[in-house]
Image: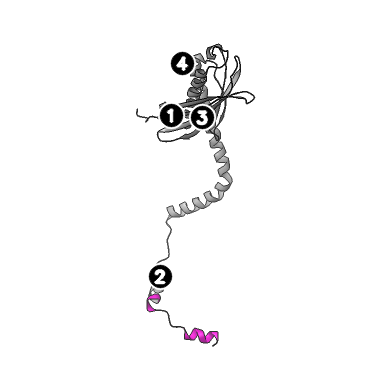
Amino acid sequence: PSRSARQETLPPPPLSLHRSFASFAALPPPRLSPPRLFSFFFRLFYSSCSRRCAPCALDALRHTMAQEAEEFLQQWVRLVNTKEGFMSAAPDVELVSVEYDAREVVFRTVVAKELQNGLGSLHGGAAATLIDELTTAAMLVFDRSRRTSVSVSLHCEYAAAAPAGEHVLVRCRVHKIGRTLAYLGADITSEDGRLFVRGSHVKFLMRASM
């Protein structure tokens, strides 16, 4: 049979389908109130502009946060260089750089007499203290609440001796900050990249109210 004949033989649609289309056609057209219209056009404008402006805004935000981190660490270094206690043995710590996206903070210090062992190289306990204190400072940059913390574990691997008078870099990395634990790491190297000590540090984060 022809196409027209096949169409004529098709059964009519059920009455319920007619009623559903009739009820849909009887509905009033959708109405947008002025607030909804404003919201619609704002989203339309924002979606078209955000593709062009979002990278610039994100870069500006990163730059601002990196500046805040550097200012905080500079204040922390000044405090360490003047305070009394165990860290007073290393008064020459200075901030080198802050890589905010990589979550890495680099400090520099010198293997002074106060940090040396009987062989005239960096004492293992002094290296552990540097890793303990400086990874904690790096963690405070990325913990927005800057909670009080205590060490859970501190592990150091000694690869080579840092000689007396050597200027060393302490490269601190913030691997993860969770609700109660922070996982940190650090390398003590020469300025040309030779590894002296590698450390891993886990800290327990107290609640802000404590």
Between label 1 and label 2, give the one nearer the viewer.
1
Mark linked to residue 24: 2
CB within 8 Å, label 1 to label 4 = no
Say which label, 3 or 2, has the lower sequence index. Answer: 2
Q: Is residue 18 visible?
A: yes
Say which label, 4 or 3, has the lower sequence index. Answer: 4
Distance between mark 1 and mark 4 Cα atoms? 19 Å
Mark linked to residue 185: 3
Residue type indicated by callout 4: Phe
Distance between mark 3 and mark 2 Cα atoms? 64 Å
Query: What span is in magenta?
Result: 1-17
Return the x and y of residue 94 as percentages of the image width and height: 56, 20
Q: Who is closer to the viewer here, 190 or 19?
A: 190
Mark linked to residue 88: none
Distance between mark 1 and mark 2 Cα atoms? 63 Å
Disc 2 is placed on an element classified as helix
Distance between mark 3 and mark 1 Cα atoms? 11 Å
Q: Who is closer to the viewer here, 121 or 83?
A: 121
Return the x and y of residue 88 as percentages of the image width and height: 49, 14
Task: Please tell me in which quadrant of the rendered image residue 96 appears.
Answer: top right
Residue type indicated by callout 3: Gly
How many numbered marks appear? 4
Q: What residue is disc 1 on?
A: 203
Q: Residue at x 48, y 26 (%)?
A: 155
Q: What residue is disc 4 on?
A: 86
Disc 3 is placed on an element classified as strand
Left or right? Give the position of 82 relative to 121: left
Residue type indicated by callout 2: Phe
Say which label, 4 or 2, has the lower sequence index. Answer: 2
